[in-house]
């Protein structure tokens, strides 16, 4: 059986067309950027050099923060209609080998029960959403935006960054060469990122030791689940005869297999087939290799996420080990941060300097996530093959191994603090309130509305979430209706800055938010909170949109 997705749309482009934004790269982060900008009614062209067919699936893990973003776009429930069974548990199993003993198991609920993973701390939860269906859901959502043009099989050959925008030279085998213009270009063109290289932006690496080569294979293994003694799992981590990871792609016969390569090892497809068969104690006839690719892990972050009118997002800005599934999810966080800032500058209600805060806010977070993924990878690397674990008489050895695995590996799948603990407290856009920073725990998330943190979930009377009141604009959250904040709301309106006012009387909201009024940014981050309207609403608005005192003086003189 072979499973691939459908190709993306293509077509001709008119020379000298001008867009607000050109996006280079049509992977999940590029498509997400198109959705976010399209939902803001900005004109967008996305170009992708490949045809959009997913032949080799990666990045199945979509975390809670990403699902909250997809919820805002109205597509989080599409996971239940994907090709991965909604009732398939997402357990992680560590085994001595596939035909002998299980050493440890990390239970996780199915996609249909995703909200159980957050224990009331979010209206969403993490899911397993293989790329065949995840990319398609994003593509269909992007294509539904009337201001978004998707063009697959178009290559960005070069670009020139000028005073007022970017000139982008494109080519297609079917349609030839075209030139388009845009105010901004967003590079979502992957780890190798030709755009980043053309800009000369360096990537910073802590150590050369972070790099390593792995073999990946997309395989069909008919009847595997029936042949092995272990309970179903979405991933199996094999210790013997060599370290190997199997990830389920359809709840049935389709799997992605990855394993580290030794120095000098560079197997051909036939060797991959034999290696997988040996690890699974089956014959080569039981393994069909649908695709095989070597890949290299890394742990680096770009020096800057911006150069002039060009911005980096996703793997072009940060590359991390897949351990923990943080790579794509960090890229989707880039999109949430960048989208409203581009809108503000393009619509004229925010200064160009607002885009400089994209690097200031996202780079420290990316560095944290890179370190987190590197920690997970090193912990996995410490689990070495041991033939004794397959010996029926060595139960004590297996028990000890299982205890070590639980002790060293559990944080990879208990990471709600990492997922929801996003904070930009050192950002110049955030108005601090003097309260202490809560302790950071990668496993446990403690809700806080301290400025710079994600606005916490509170269940509303109708069963929805306070997060559903955040629609991608600034939101003035009134938790104590007796407090008048009309002057602040009027300042936003006078400036032409999109603002929603919402009144929340839900039980516990005042306790969770710790204030009467909270100003929530378009990306769901609390920018300011207080118990009374600020004395100088203009100064507050200036700060949260990145306008300096000098900018403010100029604005007042010209208004």
Image (cartoon, grey):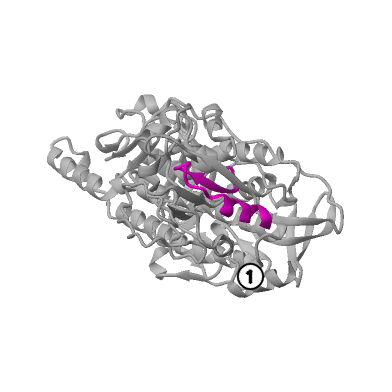
Q: Looking at the picture, does residue 537 appear above or below residue 241?
A: below
Q: Nearer the viewer, residue 414 or 481?
A: 481
Asked if the stretch drawn in magenta spans residue 145, the answer is no
Tag 1 residue: 552
Q: Could you say where residue 46 lies in the image, as x and y percent from the top left?
A: 71, 51
User: Residue 356 lies in what quarter of the image?
Assistant: bottom right
Q: Nearer the viewer, residue 126 or 49?
A: 126
Q: Looking at the picture, does residue 301 appear above or below residue 529?
A: below
Q: What residue is shown at x 69% (from left), y 46% (from top)?
A: 38
Visible residue check, residue 357: yes
Counting every numbered tag in the picture gives 1
Q: Is residue 192 left or right of residue 496?
A: left
Q: Is residue 344 left or right of residue 466?
A: right
Q: Could you say where residue 439 lies in the image, as x and y percent from the top left?
A: 30, 56
- Extreme residue in the bottom direction: 550
Q: Could you say where residue 314 lies in the image, as x and y percent from the top left?
A: 55, 56
Visible residue check, residue 131: no
Q: Could you say where residue 231 lies in the image, as x and y percent from the top left?
A: 32, 28
Q: What residue is shown at x 16% (from left), y 40% (from top)?
A: 399
Report helix, strand or loop for mark 1.
helix
User: Residue 546 lies in what quarter of the image?
Assistant: bottom right
Q: Looking at the picture, does residue 536 appear above or below residue 271?
A: below
Magenta-colored span: 471-495
Q: Residues within 10 Å of mark 1 (few under 14, many from 20)?
A: some
Q: Nearer the viewer, residue 464 or 287?
A: 464
User: Residue 209 lies in what quarter of the image?
Assistant: bottom left
Q: Nearer the viewer, residue 313 or 400?
A: 313
């Amino acid at each position: 059986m072979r499973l691939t997705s459908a190709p993306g749309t293509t077509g001709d482009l008119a020379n000298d067309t001008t867009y607000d934004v050109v996006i280079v790269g049509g992977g999940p982060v590029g498509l997400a950027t198109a959705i976010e900008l399209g939902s803001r009614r900005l004109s967008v062209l996305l170009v992708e050099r490949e045809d959009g067919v997913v032949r080799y699936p990666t990045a199945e893990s979509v975390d809670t923060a990403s699902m909250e973003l997809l919820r805002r776009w109205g597509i989080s429930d599409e996971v239940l209609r994907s090709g991965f069974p909604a009732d398939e548990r997402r357990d992680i199993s560590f085994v001595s080998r596939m035909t002998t003993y299980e050493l440890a198991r990390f239970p996780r609920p199915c996609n249909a029960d995703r909200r159980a993973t957050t224990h009331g701390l979010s209206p969403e939860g993490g899911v397993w959403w293989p790329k065949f269906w995840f990319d398609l859901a994003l593509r269909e959502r992007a294509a539904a935006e009337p201001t978004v043009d998707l063009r697959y099989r178009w290559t960005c050959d070069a670009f020139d960054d000028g005073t007022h925008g970017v000139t982008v030279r494109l080519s297609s085998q079917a349609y030839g060469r075209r030139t388009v213009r845009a105010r901004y270009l967003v590079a979502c063109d992957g780890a190798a990122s030709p755009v980043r290289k053309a800009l000369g932006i360096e990537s910073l690496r802590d150590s050369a030791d972070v790099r390593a080569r792995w073999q990946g294979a997309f395989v069909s293994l008919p009847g595997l689940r029936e042949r092995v003694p272990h309970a179903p799992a979405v991933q199996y981590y094999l210790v013997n005869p060599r370290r190997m990871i199997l990830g389920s792609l359809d709840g049935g016969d389709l799997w992605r297999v990855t394993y580290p390569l030794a120095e000098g090892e560079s197997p051909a497809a036939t060797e991959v087939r034999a290696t997988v068969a040996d690890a699974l104690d089956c014959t080569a006839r039981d393994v069909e290799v649908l695709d095989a690719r070597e890949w290299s892990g890394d742990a680096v972050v770009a020096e800057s996420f911006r150069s002039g009118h060009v911005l980096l997002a996703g793997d072009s800005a940060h590359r991390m080990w897949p351990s923990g599934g943080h790579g794509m999810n960090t890229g989707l966080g880039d999109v949430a941060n960048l989208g409203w800032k581009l809108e503000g500058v393009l619509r004229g209600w925010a200064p160009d300097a607002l885009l400089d805060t994209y690097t200031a806010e996202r780079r420290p977070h990316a560095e944290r996530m890179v370190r987190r993924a590197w920690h997970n990878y090193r912990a996995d690397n410490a689990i070495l093959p041991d033939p004794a674990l397959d010996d029926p008489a060595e139960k004590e050895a297996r028990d000890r191994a299982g205890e070590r695995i639980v002790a060293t590996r559990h944080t990879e799948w208990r990471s709600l603090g990492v997922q929801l603990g996003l904070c930009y407290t050192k950002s110049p856009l955030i108005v601090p309130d003097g309260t202490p920073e809560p302790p950071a725990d990668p496993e446990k998330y403690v809700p806080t509305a301290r400025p710079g943190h994600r606005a916490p979930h509170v269940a509303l009377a109708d069963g929805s979430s306070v997060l559903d009141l955040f629609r991608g604009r600034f939101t003035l959250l009134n938790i104590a209706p007796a407090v008048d904040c009309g002057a602040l709301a009027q300042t936003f309106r006078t400036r032409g800055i999109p603002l929603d006012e919402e009144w929340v009387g839900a039980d516990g909201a005042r306790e969770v938010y710790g204030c009467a009024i909270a100003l929530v940014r378009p990306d769901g981050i609390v920018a300011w909170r207080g118990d009374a309207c600020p004395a100088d609403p203009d100064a507050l608005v200036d700060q949260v949109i990145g306008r300096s005192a000098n900018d403010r003086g100029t604005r007042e003189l010209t208004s």
